[in-house]
Image (cartoon, helix red, strand yellow):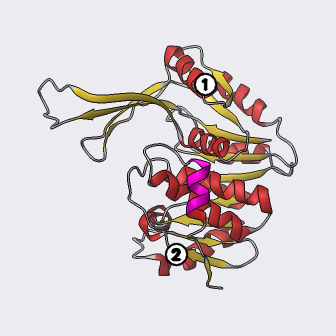
Amino acid sequence: MICTVTLNPALDYTLDVKDFRPGRTNRTLREEILPGGKGINVSLVLRNLGFESRVLGFTAGFTGAELERLLRERGLKTDFIRLPSGMTRINVKLRSMEGTELNARGPEIGPESLELFLERIGELSSGDVLVLAGSVPQSLPGSIYEDIMGKLSGKGVRILVDAEGEALKGVLPLRPFLVKPNIHELGGLFGRELSGPEEVPFYGKKLQEAGAENVLVSMAGQGAVFLSAEGHVYRSPAPKGELINGVGAGDSMVAGFLAGWLESGNYETAFSLGLAAGSASAFSEGLAEKKEVQRLLQEIRPRRLE
């Protein structure tokens, strides 16, 4: 069984507004509401690649009910803890103003709801896979990812972590199966701004020394670098394509890597499928579809550096 965790999911309300003017009435050209959250994106791409997963996290209010409906409509299995008050957040994204977003705080998660969630997590067992992705809500302890991994310690659950900063640093001693920082997040862990892929292996190895088994570093248009548990370092440029939407590309890379690993048990294959899936999302309006992933996969030829 594969489970993904999104602690603070959202409804993403995306608006196309021509010539947006602050302080004036602006009318949209197009709008859409989509389920949002890094773990949710991983589950959606896994589904597109033929793998079922269960989506865990917290929802609240009428917006939470709508989020769950949208996910079921897309064929996902949901297993959220319903909070007694508040509402699942709505994030507003203005497509016409690049990078302009209004991200809400989200509902308060009380100790009783957290305990129910941890009990559900504790049901995972040997052979299961867990993906922890995204930021930690302010109402939860900053150590929540460590707490989750500690609860599963010794159970044989493979855990993939896509987080940044202290949330990522804290899980390293618990030996996650995979961590996936981007190049900026990797540099930030060491107080550096990395200039390019040549610097990535050195700092990626530091994450392995701290406990991570595998390290996958995304670099947007520069491709990706992968450090395997077998001691190999792979690098590949991104396949050619037009960047349309970078949102969800990193999540898609995690999903592609996991799908490739489950299909083959081969790290190079997993790396290639991860890069293909991330690129397929970046080159499309939505998340990666299997046909496009398979097409881009033909262009990827990772080079083993070590």
Above or below, 5 relative to 150? above
Give percent across and percent down for residue 160: 68, 53
Disc number for residue 73: 1
Badge 2 amino acid? Val
Give percent across and percent down for residue 82: 63, 19
Q: Which quadrant holds the N terminus?
A: top right
- Residue located at (38% from left, 57% from top): 243
Residue 47 magenta-highlighted: no
Segment tinted magenta in the rendering: 289-295
Mark 1, secondary structure of its residue: helix
| CB under 8 Å between discs 2 and 1 | no
Residue found at the far bottom of this picture: 306
Give percent across and percent down for residue 66: 53, 19
Instruction: Name the dominant secondary structure of the magenta segment.
Output: helix
Marks 2 and 1 sit apart, C-alpha to C-alpha, by 40 Å
Mark 2, secondary structure of its residue: helix
